[in-house]
Amino acid sequence: MRAVGLLLLLLALCGSGAQGELKETETTKTTTPDIWAEVRALRDMVVELKVELRNVQAAVTDSESQVEELKAELMVTNVYTRLSSSESRIETLERENTERKVAFYTALTDSGTVGPFNTDITLKYSKVFTNIGDAYSPSTGFFTAPVRGVYYFQFTLSGQQTGTMGVKVYKNNQRIMWNVEYKEEAGVEYVTNSVVLELMAGDEIHLVLPTSASLYDDTNNHNTFSGSLLFTL
């Protein structure tokens, strides 16, 4: 009986050991597939990261190319802007240079006696010999200052018949000079005068024949009106 008990005890121990080995095997079998699954997942992540990295590198390369194109466009734009600015500056300088060259010389008429009239009359010096800058208008008799500056003007009057000959000089609507001569006898007489004026751009100068006064002019140009820009301000 004692032998049978020992045998049963031995079998029990063996059975217990076998069950332990079985459990260990099952645990190993369960753990091993999990590790390989994680390894495969990591490998897939690495592959995805490589793909993303290539995409990022491609995007960076494309961005660098776009940046270079933008730099080139910016350089062209800057050059164009500077060129346009230079052209505009050149045009401005040319216009200013043209405006600074102002001079005119005119004579009154070839028709003989002018006046007298019962009102003041703006004299239109119709014979234009010099008109640099086109500041004088023979159709109106007005000189218009193209730029601010100091101008010199001169006029010569001539009359043949008895009575009054004279002229008024106007700056815009302001009379700044009135020269008059009374002729008791017929014949040619002259009056010459000049004036230096500071004018703003757009200021106008014109000469007026006073009421009851008369002048005489013909192809010999006895009555003249001239002026020029001395310097700008």
Image (cartoon, rainbow, N blue to C red):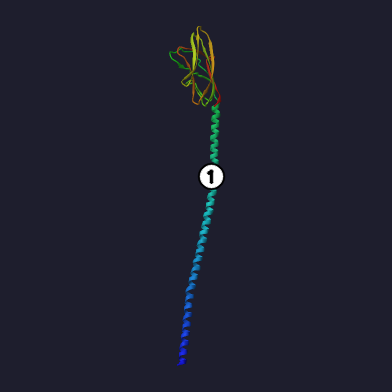
Residue 229 or residue 13, whichever sits in front: 13
Dividing the image into 4 quarters, which one contains the C terminus? Answer: top right
Residue visible at 48% across and 73% down in the picture = 31
Residue 55 or residue 34, whichever sits in front: 34
Please, which residue is most extreme toward the front here? 2
Q: Residue 1 placed where, x, y %?
A: 45, 93
Where is 213 relative to 93, above or below?
A: above
Mark 1: amino acid: Leu
Q: Residue 218 placed where, x, y %?
A: 52, 14
Residue visible at 54% across and 34% down in the picture = 89
Is residue 130 shown to the viewer in this render?
no
Residue visible at 54% across and 51% down in the picture = 65
Q: How many numbered markers are drawn?
A: 1
Q: Residue 231 placed where, x, y %?
A: 56, 25
Q: Residue 67 placed where, x, y %?
A: 53, 49
Where is 61 relative to 98, above or below?
A: below
* Residue named by callout 1: 74
Q: Secondary structure at mark 1?
A: helix
